[in-house]
Amino acid sequence: MVFLRRAWPLAICCHGYTNRHTSLARVCQRSFSCAKKLNQISTSGNLAALKSVLKVSEEVTDALATNKPVVALESTIYTHGALGDDLDLEGVVRCNGGVPAVVGILGGIPTVGLLPEEVARMVEGSPKKVSRRDIAYLVGMGMAGNKIHGGTTIAGTMILARLAGIRVFGTGGLGGVHRGGHESFDISADLTELGRTRMAVISSGCKGFLDIPRTLEYLETQGVLVSTFADGRAGNVDFPAFWARDSGVKSPSAVYDEEQAAAMILAQERLGIESGMLFANPIPEEFSIARTEMDAIIEQAVNESAQQGASGNENTPFILTRIRELTDGRSVLANIVLARANVERATKIAVALSQLAAGGSVSSNKLCRVKQQDGTQNFKSVSIDETSREPEGVSQTDVLVAGSVAVDLNCDYVGEDSLEHPAPHLHTSNLAHTGQSIGGVGRNVALAAQKVMQSSKVRLCSMIGDDLAGSTIISSLKASGMDTSCVKQLNREHYPTSRTAQYVAINDANKNLVLGMADMGIFTAHSFPEHWTSAVKSSKPKWLVVDGNWADRDIRAWIRAGKQNDAHVAFEPVSKEKSARVFCNEKGLESLGVFPNPSIDLATPNQYELAAMHAAAQRNEYLDDPRWWEIIDAFGMRGARDRFVKLTSASMADAGIPQQVIQLLPYIPTIITKLGSNGALLTKIVRKDDPLLFDSASEKFILSRSLNNHPEVGGVYMRLFPVVEQVDDVVSVNGVGDTFLGVLIAGLAQGAKVESLVNIAQKGATLTLRSSQSVSDDLGILRSEIIAAAATAAS
């Protein structure tokens, strides 16, 4: 709270200045001057002077450096609020195309971009509530060795977010002038902070039990723009009263869409006006509480607070508790809805602002609120006209591979006892033959597809660092004829810690992988969803391949971009650990689609990756979804073990391989499980009109037929393809699985059926087994077989 030193009547403080107020004006000028100096530090883009004090997460640093939309979030909503776990505000930001930046003080260090586990540490560590006056105390105590956690209020969040260079902040409700504030001078520090720190704050006005007219007067005196979203209303609109859309007090101005708000923010910045801006966002109408009802409840709660002597820091919590009780909990649901709606709107403003700052244009977005059965809402953007610049020189292609490219180092054990003991010895040095090459799952898949079809209509979309390894990769890709227009090189100035991915393979004397070590952090530390969307949109691929090296959110972003542009999507799991990312916790992410509208059309795990995917799907409750049950029921799988054994083997059935595949089919309707020396198991959903259901030669591979008249599901096809050749002269196992997928996707892009391509893909894998390269140079000999398979499918 702010307590004015002199007992001037509040009404006088809120109107014109006289000589009597000269000293106050000078104080204000000094505050603005100080704020301006801080702003100059952050707007210059050089945070070097702050790095010893202020910590900004790598994701937020990256976003600010590349003009991505960033939204600040306060941490008191987690540390001192009762609803933090139910809000998932970071998820709301990500779903609408922004980067969330939770602000707080972690162990005495002011931090912008707190991770979930860091917030959890704060919550468990008896955090303090931190406004402007408290920041230096906690940070100074931290410097002295007393590590204190602090959840930042609106005022505290504004300061730290502004120092980091963030422009937009989404929150629930602003503080204000308390009733009787003209006598008690009980005024929230949020208001004075808005007068001196340039930040666009989006909230549902201020708490309804505050003195709204005096709050607006105070903000006017502080030079704060206050504008309320009209939400389709014409004429003068009311300033909202938190739980109620109307307060009976007219808003100083109205704003009609996020683009107008963004333009105001940019104008304020370019004019050098250092005060903040308040954009009031009325609570969605279906969750608002009628003004007359709310006024009566607030009046009762405020009177009881006075009777109980609740003042100062005790006042607001007492009133909020009584309001929750008097509304039978409706105020709690309203709190959740309005906070999420405000953060969604803040993100859309940030998106529009990023586009304007880049010199682009923007178009209006519409809010789509989806009401759930439990009364809560999901907020989804239904039309954002993204104007992010497309990669230059990008043309239409058949296959787009979104995945890793890396420098590979292969170490083959050649010890004296390698014939008797082919495995290298642990805890000591081993003799080895080493070789370096360019690899990476994404690169290998793309190169295999390109080589087998001898076509330039294959494109790789990846990231590299600004280092020697990155330059080597670019040269190698160009030498092999690969299109590098979508390979993003991260500038060293903006991304000083980013390294080109590298992979080290330790193989035994028989060239079998013993241990792999992968430094793929560049793919999880940086996110460019607008760039990815633009790459898919401009490439218009028939097939998009996404590998598991990306972070969870980026895997979903790639999949979404593929489906939005009518591409078939294939997922390459990469490893046991990374395979689980496709079935990650969906909090804050768009749900995976289920057959007949799946988000992913095909996946090629090995049996260990399959098990990890299945475990993740179980753990994160994908197998409890009613949509999943509908498809599983349509399979008619009762008493299927005998069929599993007949179509695969008893050992596979005992290992649970066919069972796991079946349970993942509703989400990925075609799964090819790579089984090493046992071949490949193809399992897929067949539609009611699929010729396989009526082909006598395919009858033995029909695992089941739909028995419940499902409109789309005809049955399940399961076929074990034995290896095409036993290879004794193995040169390297690296890239074998990638080659399999690359050949397969190349054939699918030509229109061939998957069941006619599995053996051709196995032949490609065999060629790579005999090659010192991660992708064999001889794949072109399979081109005629793929063309023949495509011709058969078309006939």
Image (spheres, rainbow, N blue to C red):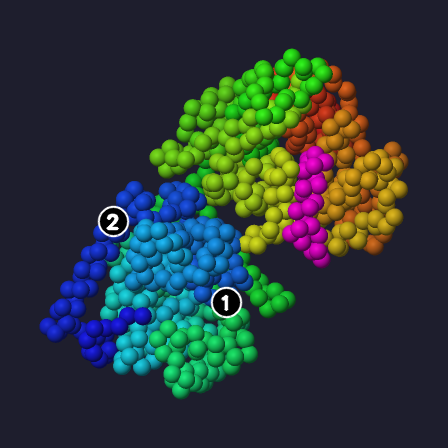
Quick check: 114 left or right of 604? left
Which of the two residues, 207 or 149, is positioned nearer the viewer here? 149
Q: Residue at x 78, y 48 (%)?
A: 713
Crowd rating for badge 2 (residues with CA inside 10 Å; few <14, some 14–19, many 20+): some
* Residue depicted at x 35% and y 51%: 145
Using the rendered image of the protein, determine whether residue 31 is visible from the camera's viewpoint.
Answer: yes
Q: Position of residue 547 (x, y in %)?
A: 59, 36
Q: Amino acid at mark 2?
A: Gln
Q: How would you rate the neighbour count of disc 1 (Cα within 10 Å): few for under 14, some for 14-19, many for 20 or more?
A: few
In magenta segment, residue 266:
no
Please name whichever residue, 141 or 721, is drawn nearer the observer in this view of the structure.
141
Task: Name the secondary structure under disc 1.
Answer: loop
Quarter holding the C terminus? top right
Q: Which mark is residue 462?
A: none
The image quarter containing residue 671 is top right
Q: CA distance from mark 1 to mark 2?
A: 37 Å
Q: Which residue is mark 1?
A: 82
Residue that carries the numbered disc 2 in the rendered image: 40
Residue drawn at x 27%, y 64% as measured from the top left: 195
Give left or right: position of 325 versus 734: left
Nearer the observer, 401 or 511: 511
Report the span colored magenta.
601-627
Q: Nearer the viewer, mark 1 or mark 2?
A: 1
In the image, residue 197 sits, relative to residue 293, either above or below, namely: above
- The mark that comes first in sequence, 1 or 2, is 2
